[in-house]
Amino acid sequence: MRWVETLRTGLDAIVSHRLRSGLTMLGILIGIAAVILTVGLGLGSQQQVGAQISSLGSNLLIVSPGSSTSGGVRGGFGSASTLTAADAAALASPVAAPDIGAVAPVKSSSLSVTAGSSNWTTAVVGTSADWATVRSRTLAAGRFLSAADVADQAAVAVLGSETATELFGTTDVVGRTVTVNGVDLEVVGVLAPAGSDSSSNLDDQVLAPLPTVANRIVGGTNKESVSTIYLQAASAGQLSAAYQEAQALLLSLHHVTDSGAADWTIASQQSLLSTVTSVSRTLTVLLTGIAALSLLVGGIGVMNIMLVSVSERTREIGLRKALGAPPSAIRRQFLVEATILGLAGGLLGAALGIGGARVLPRLLSTDIVVSPLAVGGSIAIAVLIGVVFGVYPATRAARLAPIDALRSE
Amino acid sequence: MSLFDLFSGDRRTPDAAPARPLPADPVGERIPVIELVDVAKTYRMGTQEVHAVRNVSLRIDAGEFVAIIGPSGSGKSTLMNVIGCLDVLSSGEYRLAGEDVGVMDEVELAHVRNRRIGFVFQQFHLLPSLSAWRNVELPLVYAGVGREQRRRRAVEALTRVGLGDRIDHKPGELSGGQQQRVAVARALVGDPALLLADEPTGNLDSTATEDALLLFDELHRQGRTIVLITHETEVAERAQRVVRVRDGVVQPDERPVGAPV
């Protein structure tokens, strides 16, 4: 029996049992679509987070307050504000840290900002004139905070574009005044929009000189503390040198001898990226595992249907054998049928997966990247499932004795 | 067994099997279509051995129309399975058109059934999803005949049984008599040495029965070798020769009165 005939016979059988074949394919279809979508989701979120991290700025080091140890209890990461404006000033020294190009300490508090009759609660950030450089931000209007503003504790502010819109209904607000905690700040500039990162809206914040925020707006007993210090290495090649200098300076400033006991953490974009990547990789493996399970279930479905098909078509098998079909032709017929089911399920599943990758990102906020490897691989897996789970039913069909098969009702 | 082997054909092709012609017939007669020598078939039912047929010797020559008749349980179905190469012998010899069938394995038997025997069954055994001509072409599919030729020969065979205008009908759209004629066309399409009909009229009404029997008469006149298995005397009487089976043993031949010898 020729291949074309085997193929035609298999297709005939599938077409004449449309509903059953469709339901069998559905199992594989869902599995394959799930594999493509989960792999795509994993890749998409990796790319997205990667883009966010590089949007933080270039050649960036982020110094965060580390855990503090009090009374033998080690607090969690970021539980203490151990960084101060003095640390930032020391790191900015071109003598002590020649590889550090720019320093932006940040002291951030959530406060209510008023302009005329409208008010808006947002992040009020005290920082230095280098912030815009370090964070790679540009201005839509006006100017950024200057070194003089910082030195003079000037009552000036730069608004994020959304903050400006919330308060004034427009971004054309240079020269107008906002009030925070009773302090009037003159708006000198508006930032160009930058979107959101994983934790905050980059376009909704009020930037003011660090001393202005620390002394005049927030006040309190902890005026010197800052929440984060952003450092920019003078160039990409000086990043690790900048890291060493920052670490050494902070060790001496904080009177710590053992770097294991440091109450701060210096992270680079690279280290952030690898953390996020490894997290999302774990997630992808987990989800793909679940998808693979559903493929296994789909494969068992194929075997189940093929076994039903064999016992339902016992008479047909008997007849074919009586008419001269050798066992190999019967085995091939059922194997081809199972393979077609697998292939069709795989192709339809791939189509559904690719379609889902187009539609889902509009509903979710993540990108789904369809990788050709995942598509090709999962179609191959679907075919393999058809073959593997078709072998047993096909062998059973081939072994039927023609007389018993003909006699069955 | 590798995956490739699962898909590929049998490693030993039946065509390569050496033909086993009989030694030259001592009397110089034609080679018989069927030659059973002291054949027995024993089944095992639990601990009991059932002798379905025993000591059967039977010779059927080319062009004969033979009815095998016997009550149910007489062993005639077993005999039909043996003659049809659907079952293997327990002992004895069976030569079909000169080939020793008794020593063949499953694959060779399939090949012999395909080339030498045309089956007509009581329940027709047509595939309901296929049209008449697709049913008729099935033996040619397994014989490896090309599609064009298969269709031509299937249509020819259907025309021969008077269904030339029904080639695209599915079995469900045909009457019982017409379905049986499709089955006869399928049996004829491969031009086999033997037409083996198992209770071909068992599921037909009297008109269709007469129709079918006329068709067998016609095929007999054309020189076909026909073996018809039945339990109805009226059907058996249409044959040229009647073989009676009782309790697994073949009774001496008798010929219906007036039948040509």
Image (cartoon, grey):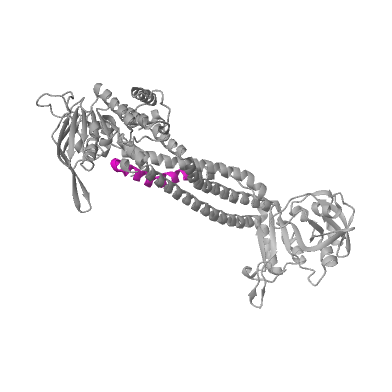
Residues rendered magenta in the picture:
A380-404
Please, is residue A272 above or below residue B160 in the view? below
Q: Nearer the viewer, residue A228 or A338?
A: A338
Q: Quadrant of the C terminus of chain A?
A: top left
Please, is residue A61 above or below residue A17 in the view? below
The spot of residue B105 in percent (x, y) is 24, 39
Q: Nearer the viewer, residue A182 or A242?
A: A182
Q: Quadrant of the N terminus of chain A?
A: top left
The dominant secondary structure in magenta is helix
Asked whether B120 falls inside the magenta stretch, the response is no
The spot of residue A250 in percent (x, y) is 70, 66
Residue A52 relative to residue A321: left or right: right
The spot of residue A194 in percent (x, y) is 75, 50
Q: Nearer the viewer, residue A154 or A25?
A: A25
Residue B9 visible, this angle: no
Q: Residue at x 39, y 41 (%)?
A: A334
Residue A396 relative to residue A292: left or right: left
Q: Residue furthest left?
A: B26
Residue A200 relative to residue B200: left or right: right
Q: Residue at x 48, y 49 (%)?
A: A298
Residue A356 visible, this angle: yes
